Image: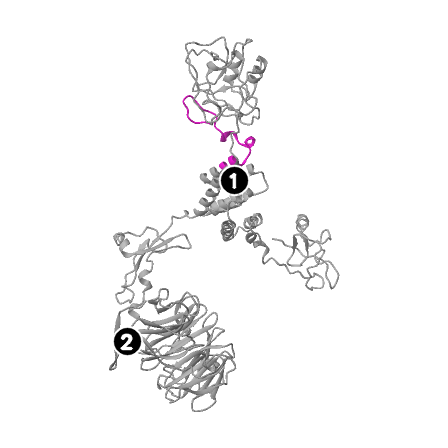
Amino acid sequence: MEKMSRVTTALGGSALTGRTMHCHLDAPANAISVCRDAAQVVVAGRSIFKIYAIEDEQFVEKLNLRVGRKPSLNLSCADVVWHQMDENLLATAATNGVVVTWNLGRPSRNKQDQLFTEHKRTVNKVCFHPTEAHVLLSGSQDGFMKCFDLRRKDSVSTFSGQSESVRDVQFSIRDYFTFASTFENGNVQLWDIRRPDRCERMFTAHNGPVFCCDWHPEDRGWLATGGRDKMVKVWDMTTHRAKEVHCVQTIASVARVKWRPECRHHLATCSMMVDHNIYVWDVRRPFVPAAMFEEHRDVTTGIAWRHPHDPSFLLSGSKDSTLCQHLFRDASQPVERANPEGLCYGLFGDLAFAAKESLVAAESGRKPYAGDRRHPIFFKRKLDPAEPFVGLASSALSVFEIEPGSGSMSWFVDTAERYALAGRPLAELCDHNAKVARELGRNQVAQTWTMLRIIYCSPGLAPATSLNHSVGKGSSCGLPLMNSFNLKDMAPGLGSETRLDRSKGDTRSDTVLLDSSATLITNEDNEETEGSDVPADYLLGDVEGEEDELYLLDPEHAHPEEPEYVLPQEAFPLRHEIVDTPPGPEHLQDKADSPHVSGSEADAASSAPMDSSFSLISVSHALYDSRLPPDFFSALVCDMLRFYAEQGDVQMAVSVLIVLGERVRKDIDEQTQEHWYTSYIDLLQRFCLWNVSNQVVKLSTSRAVSCLNQASTTLHVNCSHCKRPMSSRGWVCDRCHRCASMCAVCHHVVKGLFVWCQGCSHGGHLQHIMKWLEGSSHCPAGCGHLCEYS
């Protein structure tokens, strides 16, 4: 999108005017260069070589240098440069290794002047001397640099970098005889054109290829370099050794770097891949660009400031076949969109928080905490008015310290060491882990383990404490057991209720509950009795009184003054007919003597009058299945695991994942499981819990995790007799045909854990050596050495 803002710059009597604009090219551009009067720009590429005039409103094509009937590789340009002293002189670097000069003053259509064919591979860069009109320098993929005198047909000097390909060469603006060259191995070399035999200085500038360099137009010794490591570095070359004075971190490989005119600390960069934008950096603020141009839609291949004394106009060519003029005032400023808030944890658990000054201005009177060991809890750096970034963005910093001991992770270490993840039944694993969590004060985690036990374990294994069968009068809780029924509608023998009287004359109506799955009898005064596997064959009620009462049904002793007993409608239908099965008094006596019945109930049962009409309600099997299938809770368990993981307790998520196994693993995607496993293993290794970490790796079913303990575990063994390396085919040396690792105690080959003395190199099975050292400290091999084992 073209922007209508316009700038006029006065430069010694002439004026530069223009706006942000672009034009479409016939083919992608590889390089651009501007003539000395800033009125024309040359664009070169594999299929384009044209000169455009830069007018106020647009680019106008002036000359096409690709002439001739047959296409020539000499016209396939990798680089182009316009001489800054002679406006008619250009030079190009061809992809076939030819350096070509062009004379625009020739009257013919073909402006080609000279051909230099001394390079064997592609020429990456050409550069004219800034003050000498006839000196041209080239750098090639063949690792050589050549200096040409345009008045001669051959090169006058050849410089060998003794390295890989040359990516850039640049003459120094201040030193007449000096030029810099960059190489693919990360080195930068400084040369004197009078001494082609060796370089003056060489240093490693980047981790990887150095693609570009540029001398500062004002500071004599500053050299900027850019490389594949996504960095732009500024070097001070005036010192004895090259000194890095600034470093800018970009987001992609740096293909071009150009210092901005009239701005000492500004430079422009573009990338050779991924990133299509052009950035202008202030090297004093290396993490946020000062300006950004976003007009191109493909990789930017060439950038050039329009005039060496005008910082407002920047020209660029791109692989999207466009030529652009960027006006600096139209550039976007990323610093305006920068987030002024930041959050970071320190090594000791301290929290640093940066926020806008306006947000913390009201809290500027806060006092530092007493006993602060490193820095005040709150501080605000006083800004220097002379700083160039005062008006751009600034934040105030707060630092919060934790209380001593509050950041301890001892619970994590204790939990990891004490948890049981395998080797026991599921119920025992859940109970053990719940106990560990409870002892460490992690009650929510303990309750989670208990709930998992209830969900996934069979009813016979469920502890009595986890079930509640005590429901009093008026209680609304409890499991639904059977449909409501009216005692009037029951068959004879079950029509009325006779309650045993134990010196209490009050009459109470109580809710009768039948729970065929109950294995214990509870009341408000007596504790639960556990461990009984005998089903509850009798109707035993739990009421609000101080003692339990046994309800007997007698058709001859009904109380007409009492109202009808109607139970509320329940949710589950009756699954079978309740039958009358009178057990007889002797069975009741056995029940009264049972240790699982409270003493008051036994007394009541033994003092009750017995007759032939005596009967009890008996349930022969469960009225219904009181348990839901474990798969019913799978979604809930998965949500629970994700909750713990999001809360940062990846230990709980992984532990439950291992303990439950296939019960829940199939409902969680592999990528999430792998992320949990790797995070937990990383934490374990940070706390040096190597054995626990290895156990987690072994119990994991993820391929990416289970192979972690298989890497970097190669053991190279040499024969203990001939000292030659052992092959991987067996335990017998191929050279001396003797067993390599013999136990000094049992004289058999050690194929498992092998322990040896570092003093005499004798050893054997771990258990054998430990048993031997219990009675003697001398070597069991008989060498007389006093062996020591840690």
Q: Are marks 1 and 2 in contact (CB under 8 Å)?
A: no
Residue type indicated by callout 1: Asn
Question: What residue is drawn where x is 26% and y is 67%?
Answer: 386
Q: Is residue 701 magenta?
A: no
The amino acid type of the residue labelled 2 equals Asp
Q: Is residue 171 visible?
A: no
Q: Nearer the viewer, residue 239 or 28?
A: 28
- Split into 4 quadrants, where in the image is the N terminus? bottom left
Residue 5 screen position, x and y as percent = 26, 69
Earlier sequence position, callout 1 versus callout 2: 2
Dot 1 corresponds to which residue? 433
Q: Is residue 707 visible?
A: yes
Magenta extent? 449-478
Q: Is residue 455 above or below residue 365?
A: above
Q: CA distance from mark 1 to mark 2?
A: 78 Å
Residue 418 at x, y = what percent? 53, 43
Q: Which residue is mark 2?
A: 56
